[in-house]
Every structure is written in C-alpha cells, then in structure tokens.
Amino acid sequence: MKKIIFFIFIVFTIGGCKTADKVTKFTNPVMWADVPDMSATRVRDDFYLISTTMHLMPGAPVMKSKDLVHWEIVSYVFDKLTDTPKYDLKEGTVYGRGQWASSIRYHNGKYYVLFSPNDEPYKAYIYSTNDPSTKWELVSRTQHFHDASLFFDDDGRVYVFSGTGSLKELKSDLSGVKEDGVSMHVFERDEEETGLLEGSQVIKYNGKYYLLMISWPRGKPRRQVCYRADEITGPYEKKVILEDNFAGFPYAGQGCLIDDKNGNWYGLIFQDRGAVGRVPLLMPCRWVDGWPMLGDESGKVPIIGEIPLAKHDTGKRIVESDDFKSSQLKINWQWNHNPIDEAWSLIERPGYLRLKTNRVVDNLYAAPNTITQRMEGPQCSGVVSIYIANMKDGDVAGFSAFNGHSGILSIIKDGNTKYLAMSTNVVNLEDRSKSILGVDIEEKERMKFDSDIIYLRIDADFNLNKDIASFYYSLDNKEWKKIGDDFKMIFDYKKLFMGTKFAIFNYATKANGGYIDVDFFEYKKSDNKAY
C-alpha cells in the first residue's frame, strides 16, 4: 500500500511540474524601469517590443521575449540621428525630444519600425529588417506623425494612425504618403475629452479595427480608451477600457495589445512612477462584447499574475553590470546625445572604458560622451571604479543620478589637487531650441583626496513617496562613506522627459587632453517593495 501511495505522489508531483513549466508568473511592474510608449509585435513564439529613449544613442531599443515577462535588449534601430547639430550638443540640444513613440510591425517576412523625432526637420523615419536582433536599414523619410501606429491591412494597403484620430495612407513601398490615398480624421474629440488623445496603437481583431489611445477627460483621471469600427475609415465608437491608479501611483495609460500563439490577449500599458520613469504593466485583455477590456475581472491592474506560456529566462536584463573586458560595449549602455567616437575606447587600455575630454564645456548637460544605463525600482545600487591619474587641470569626472534634476558625485582636478564633491544640478532649457540657458548648482559637500583610484556608489529608492538617491565613496571598495545629502529625484517632462539614469562622465572646463579609465560598473537590484 505504501508503494502505491508513493507512486501516486510521484506521478502527481511530476505532472504538477509539467503544468508549472507551461506557466510564467509575474509581478507588476514587469520592468520597473523607464520603458515608455510601448509597441509590440509577435511572430510565432517571439515577442518584440520597442520603446522611447529620445536623446539617448543608440536609440529606439528593441526588446525580445518569449513569455512577455522576461525581456532583453536585442538591438537598437539606429546608432545616431544627424538631422541637426543639436544631436551633437551643438547649437542647442534635443533633451526630451529626439526619437519619440515608435511603432513596430511584422509584414510579409519583414519587421518595420516607424517613429517621428519631436524636433526639426519634423520628418518621420521608417526602418526595416529581416531579423530584429540584427541591423536595421532605413527605408524612407516621410512626413511627421505624432505618436504614430503603422498598420498593414489584410488587403495590402498601408496606413498610419497618429495625433488625435488622424489617418493617412502610405504608398505600398513606404516611400511616403499616397497622394490619392485615404487622408482624414476618423473621429472628432467629444465634449468629455480635453487636449490631445495620443499614443495611437492599432490592431485588427475579428474583422474590426481597434485604435487604442490615452485621454485626459474633464474632471477625471487619465485613462486608456479604445475606438472601434467595422471599416478603417469609420465610423468609430469609443469605450474606456482601463482606468486604475495601480499600487498608489498615478493612473496607468498608453501602451499596446498583443496576443500569444494560443489566442490569449494581453495589455502592456505604462504607468508614471515618478523619478524612475514610466514603467510597463502587464495585464490580461478580456474581450467583452467585442471590446478589449484591460485588467482583471474588476478592471484593475493585477499585482501578480500568470501567463500561460513556458517561462523563458535568458538571464539577460535591461540593466547589467559591466567589467569592460569585451571589445564592444554591452547593449545596455546608451550615450547622452551622439557620442564622439574617437574620444572613447575599450582597447587603448584593455579591460577599461576610457573616456577622453574632447570639448571644453562648463556643465554636465553640455558634456559629450556621458554614458548611461537605466535605474530600476523598487531599489537599486550602482558602483563605478575610476582611475583618475590622467585627469588634467579643470577636468570634471564622476558618477550621477542623471536627469533634469541631477544628483552628482564629481571628481574635480584643480591644479595638482583632486577633490570629490557631491552636488545637485538643475538644468534650465530654452523652450524652442532646448538650448542650455544655465544650470543651478548647489554643492553639498567637498573633500580633498590623493588616491588615483576612487570608487563611487549611488543607491536609489523608488518606492512609493520615496525617489531618494544617496551618495557614497570609497578608496578601497570595502569601507564606504556617505557624502553630501540625500537627493530627491524628479521626473520633469519639461526638461529631459525621462526616468533617472546612472551616468558616467568626464569633461574639460579648461583644455582637452585628459582622460579617465573606468574599471567596472557593478549593478545590484533589490526587490524590497513597499507593497
């Protein structure tokens, strides 16, 4: 009898394991990091997601997943943008502009991306590739489309939804707008809505067209709405499909719908989370009376959930440590504006990232070759080891919680003396050109030191009502000392319009010729949530 019971237990356990292998559990947000303006497409088992990184280069990051929970960066659509000198931090900047909300689609064996930089000359880009994990090629430049959704219809015609209900037809080769094609507004904003309805994402389901948008109704919180029609040109009817202030943070809104190979549907919708940026929330999509209702049965974003797909975790993350031993930068890094390629190297001193001064400036926001990675919630920490023996008089190098409001650890070379200072910087930008009008700097603490190697650490807490960065230094990577004050990080859409980033920098205030060598960036993430 004991043998029979034992046998039944083994069979039940193995069967349970097999069932569990087909389910991926998740906790929202699925990425507690700045991944806004999501657009997704699927080909068989592979999901691809594209997001916005504006003034960071390379840009338009493409992420891949097989279970909608574990995502890794596999490519960027472009290395640099060169429409104006502002992308090089000359004659202005593109802070908060550059590459905006993109659309990724699969059609006839190719993947396509459409995005419109929110800056001069106000023309869209269309790129394509056979494999999103490799290089993307430019297809065309077209007219500007705000927050656009590229759409390939079943009859082969191609459209772009953008703005507040704008619909235009493209030529079949995607070279531009079709002169005699569809060009219209498919709906007019009703009395309940204020301002723009934006963030267009379009799908076709059971023969109907579904246009997802974000809206700010009068006297009500931000929400996700859907416009539905039997014909692409309308008439369209509207329904609110999500309205939830998840986990105490502001209301969620703007994103996309995606299905799996088994016919299940999901929503990927971002939520503003303060200084960390706009984070992706994963949720069920329930088709109710032909409407894609987001959230659980009560219309709420779930804190935890399960996806009926096998877990697929490659171990790669959107933020990663780096020892700089490779001949190429890890894909997780992005430069602030276009880099000056001759002013950085991974081979001049193998195992180190060398950052050379290359332009005399007077503040971090004007400094080329600042290199960044995202920060993540709920808590994270970054450590850099920097060799500074080759800094020149007037050079400033260091590590920052970088945003329009920044907390900064600066190594300052003044004559033959080295100082470490913790300060706060707030940039002031001209509205039109985004030129730097000035930087409000407040130094909190300064100390002299003699070592040629220094370790800098930033700890960040993005839990509800926190957004605090703390700053530390060490001369041996063992004993750490706090410096300066805790810093309240801020997301400011009028300045950089992005989540706070880890940033490593080196710039000259007097003359070029100095350089630093970064030995490593060590990253740790804590799951110490406040809920």
Image (cartoon, helix red, strand yellow):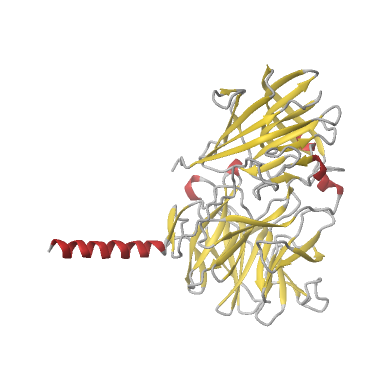
Left or right: 183 as drawn, with respect to 8:
right
Q: Residue at x 67, y 46 (%)?
A: 326
Write down the quadrant of residue 6 in the picture.
bottom left
What is the number of callouts on the image? 0
**Residue 44 in the image: above or below residue 406:** below
Is residue 126 visible in the rendered image? The answer is yes
The residue at 86%/43% (across/down) is: 90
From what the image shows, is residue 158 above or below residue 520? Answer: below
Position of 371 compared to 90: left or right?
A: left
Q: Is residue 217 visible?
A: no
In the displayed structure, 70 sits above or below 351; it is below
Give the residue at the far bottom of this rendering: 155
**Which residue is more in the foreground, 73 or 173?**
73
Find residue 50 and report its horizontal and vertical position in percent: 64, 59
Residue at point 76% right, 59% down? 116
Residue 230 or residue 425, whichever sits in front: 425
Q: Position of residue 510 (x, y in %)?
A: 85, 27
Placement of 486 over or under 84, stated as above or below = above
Quadrant housing residue 188: bottom right
Residue 262 in the image, given as x and y percentages of width and height? 48, 72
| Quarter the C terminus occupies | top left
Dividing the image into 4 quarters, which one contains the N terminus? Answer: bottom left
**Is 238 or 14 nearer to us in this picture?**
14
Q: Residue at x 58, y 52 (%)?
A: 219
Which quadrant of the view contains residue 208? bottom right
Q: Is residue 232 left or right of residue 344?
A: left
In the foreground, 104 or 292: 104
Q: Is residue 469 left or right of residue 427?
A: left
